Image (cartoon, grey):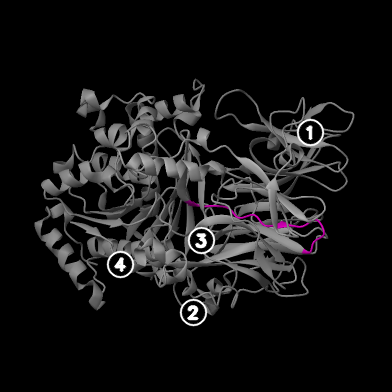
Amino acid sequence: MVKLSSSLLALAGALCGAGEAHAACDDLLASARTVRSPELSPELSTGAASSPSSGASSGARSRAMTTMDLARIRDVGDTEVISNPQSPYALSPDGRSIAFVIARGDPRANAYCSALVVMPRKGGGAPRIIDRGGAIPRLAAVFRDLYIVTGFPDTIVPAWSPDGTSIAYRKEVDGIVQLVSAKADGSGSRVLTHEGSNVENFKWLPDSGALAYFTRPGRDAARQRIAREARTGWLYDKSILPMQSWEPQPWAKDLARAAFVVELAGPKVRPATPQEERFINPPPAAGAPYELAVRAPNGASAWTAPVSDLPYAKRRVWARVPGGKDIACKADGCTGKIGRLFWQQDGKSVVFLAREGWNSEDFVLYRWVPSSNRLTTILRTGDALTGCIFAGDELLCGRENAATPRRIMGVDLASGRSRLIFDPNPEFAKLNLGKVTRLKVRSDRGYPAWADLVLPPDYDGRSKLPLVVVQYRSTGFLRGGIGDDYPIFPMAAKGLAVLSFDRPPSVGSQDPSVKTFEQGRAVDWNDWADRKNTLSAIEAGIDAAVATGAIDPERIGISGLSDGASTIEFALINSRRFKAAAMSTCCDDLLTQTVLGGFAWGEEILRRGVPPSVDNDREYWKPISLSINARKIDTPILMQVADREASLGLPAIGALTEAGKPLEVYVFPDEYHNKWQPAHRLAVYDRAIDWFNFWLRGVEDPAPGKREQYARWRELARKAPKEGTPMSP
């Protein structure tokens, strides 16, 4: 059965304008505070603890986490642990204060609260809100030569004026991202720009009296052209992405960026001079290396460069001192997955972050002295470190682990010890999350992967629990997997063990013959090599979980979005282990991949060696196609998909329905690949828990509002083959 989620809360209008005014924003900082706590030693914290993470003793923890707790978590920066070149933290010119934007979803109002916050870096005062925002801007960027809105949250980076009196940042105003300036002392703020398209990036000019910024003035003209064409029909070409909209997307070539300067005295806007434009986005210096990453006050520079011309090549740290030659760091730690680089104040040593260890689970902070080529380890931790910025004697970073949400920490560059600066979610320290254990496994190719096994807080240690696999990254705080649709700790609180899976490297990335990323993807798709690689690692993780004695091997569920959903499709056809499934995207199929996504997407898929749809090559798609295998699949499937992508699942939905298989589909309006509306996220959370509890435990939530839901599911179970019937607890 297909259901359209049509609640008024789901309407896009509720997320801007009046909708924002009704969000419960009073507690955005009400319980968030600095906390005096012991310093953390470099080795204290790990990525997945064997018991609840630090913050409060187990005895002080009062209750389990709910879906509402997770839906209303406060965020600073990106919600996932990613390699983002931008940091959400900004240090004042005198080094004494930091600024950042904090955000929180309100499912009841289906809106976001956000605010620009300033606080002392080292004690002496509480965080203060100096400007309030609303909806989180969604990232708009160039993909396949088109300028599209992705639905992913944009990173908001505040910037202090050179004199330290004001802070500028990008803020959504009436649906468009504008430039806003707020007084650092909280005495006022104002919108500086009134552009017709988003302000993309900006920089203070040296005198603190003006800001230079980029926008795309051609956006209005593109909108008008598309509207005119609508009267006679839109030509179906590469500019139409059906999984985005039937309305053509503007070509990036028609939306060239233009630079402007806004003078605060007016505010008055004028075109930027060529010199001011270069100031916003300086071009590489003549003879500069591959990627000039950071420059010291004395003119020394440091950067990373690939060790070969292969697409998946590791990177090596290099440096150039004034009057000297290029120096490559020869130590093992200087080559690999290298993140941020910083020169220390003396200009003699470089500090940088790297990912190492089993499937890159460790975050390592190194110090390298180019003159002696000496490398020392400052910190090695399983905690995720994100958005780090240099602050003299320490780095300011977001730090989180499996059972602790992100906190802003100072990492001492001499000792590696961490100190707490700001905890956005101090209430979480009182939640009983249950036991988290990291299980390290390998795929059938020998590639490393891991899975964090989460047990219910009240687990008695004797019974056998049903297990739900959540995919496909498990770094940092365990929220809901990629896409944040499957709430790990709330699910465990409802009696389900959860296996948060971090997938192994792709097959193409490990193939030395691969010369381009496109070739790497073709290797992945050849004979479904990467699907086999990933599924084998998941099954190894399940085996490891069963070996703990806590898991019932006959009651296994699986969930996922995007790559995770593709793995579900492959698993339901090539494995008999999974008794229930929940998907947030669908599906890999003959028409879905080459036709229904539009010409641009179809051509990209064909370059991976996929047969064109005109060949009707069912044998190629048979290992992964739900539509081709509909009669053989008995696993109950819940799909909760975005309206923009729902049509991609129609071949599978139609075939499974015709075959009489247990399937329920929900479509969420005005959604993207990753859902962005708080009400939708909460609904997806709750329904996923209900689904797995129904099919894996035979348990129903007695809430009156769910009676119709369970009546439908009981009917699905009645018609389903024995394989798809609910199991008793």
In this rendering, the label closer to the viewer, 3 or 2: 3
Let me know if residue 154 is in the magenta part.
yes
Local crowd size for mark 2, using a 10 Å CA cut-off: few (<14), some (14–19), many (≥20):
few
> Looking at the image, is mark 4 or mark 3 earlier in the sequence?
4
- The local secondary structure at tag 2 comes to loop
The residue that disc 3 covers is: 174
Q: Residue at x 55, y 75 (%)?
A: 427
Distance from Cα at disc 4 to Cα at disc 2 = 34 Å
Q: Earlier in the sequence, mark 4 or mark 2?
A: 4
Mark pair 4, 3: CA separation:
23 Å
Can you identify the residue that label 2 sits on?
Answer: 62
Inter-mark Cα distance, 4 to 1: 57 Å
Q: Which residues are magenta?
A: 152-165
Q: Looking at the image, can residue 328 be seen?
A: yes
Q: Position of residue 116 (x, y in %)?
A: 64, 65
Q: Which mark is residue 7?
A: 4
Q: Secondary structure at mark 4?
A: loop
Q: Nearer the viewer, mark 4 or mark 2?
A: 4
Amino acid type at mark 3 = Asp
Disc 3, disc 1: CB below 8 Å? Answer: no
Q: Quadrant of the N terminus?
A: bottom left
- Which numbered disc, 2 or 1, marks the residue that appears first in the sequence? 2
